[in-house]
Amino acid sequence: MLNKKDLRIVFFGTPDFAVASLKAIIDQGYNVVGVVTAPDKPAGRGYELQQSAVKKFAVEQHLNVLQPVNLKADDFNIALAELKADLQIVIAFRMLPEKVWNSPPLGTFNLHASFLPNYRGAAPINWAIINGESSTGVTTFFLKHAIDTGSILLQEPTPILPEDNVGTLHDKLMLQGAQLVVKSLDLILTGNYELQEQVEGDYKHASKIFTEHCLIDWHKKASEVHNLVRGLSPFPTAFTIINGKKLKIFETEITELQSTQAGVVEIIDKALLISCADKKIKLLSIQPEGKKRMPAIDYLNGFRITEPTIAQSSL
């Protein structure tokens, strides 16, 4: 049986979601011999190079950092081989070539923010809320060819509360996932574990979120619009177009008022309402084009309806 210091781990990850797991691994005394993350990218008005969240943390911890542009490049694969990893962990990183994920003797496992096999794909947290699920979870599994289909090591469920949005659920799953990664490592150290194969079926998918997914269709039921807003808040954010201008919507409330016509914008009792297919929905937190996020009631101070106004449901 290996001990924590003998187990040589290479960690792959990029955003904050991955940092929590990397920190937990190090805090538990595991031996991280290398960290692979995205190359620095220009950002902001000055196009200054920005480091990934994982790189910033890894540098603070004095870890060996690799930032390959091409995961199939010889120089990267030589550098990776020199780390002599026994095991690799992948969290919120791009798809790995088989040559990379199949190289360590103990394999490569991934942390996924859903209760697999449901919500395989790039945006599991968003789609679980958008689809109105009451629960989701985190899963560790060993990689194989098809994305998110490998043998499951451990899983834990978590409830999705009515007040959750993608931001709050992301943070919950990030911390829960970090603990699951540590539990998975502890189990691997024993060498005594059984993998659970994923049974194929008609499961819900979690495709990448594009602009067209964020545009609100007011012909849908109020519950569907409300869940879309939750599932995209605070980022990338649901939006509509009113009088030719984009309005981002971060928070809504379903009212008991029956709709008149889908997309009709009204001010009732100092509240900004828009009709869905069945009920009217109240906007609580918004960001008008060219302005900062604000309570909808503040927006009404400069917003007037002089004629029937319809929120667009298409670009």
Image (cartoon, rainbow, N blue to C red):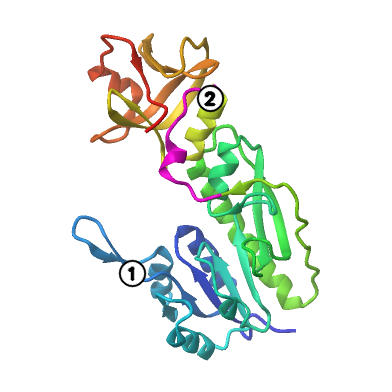
Q: From the viewer's perspective, is 87 left or right of 240?
A: right
Give the mark toward the camera: 2 or 1.
2
The disc at residue 220 is 2
Give percent across and percent down for residue 299.
29, 23
Callout 1: SS: loop
- In reply to whether residue 21 is colored magenta, the answer given is no
Q: Residue at x 55, y 70 (%)?
A: 27
Q: Residue furthest front?
A: 315
Q: Give neighbour class at mark 2: few <14, some 14-19, many 20+ (Cα, 10 Å).
A: some
The answer to which image quadrant residue 67 occupies is bottom left
Q: Is residue 233 visible?
A: no
Q: From the viewer's perspective, is 152 left or right of 132?
A: right
Q: Residue furthest left?
A: 46
Give percent across and percent down for residue 264.
40, 15
Specify the segment rendered in magenta: 207-221
The disc at residue 40 is 1
- Up the image or down, 134 lies above or below 29; here it is above
Q: Is residue 21 visible?
A: yes
Label 2 amino acid?
Lys
- Up the image or down, 164 lies above or below 300; here it is below
Residues at marks 2 and 1, CA–CA distance in whole angstroms = 41 Å
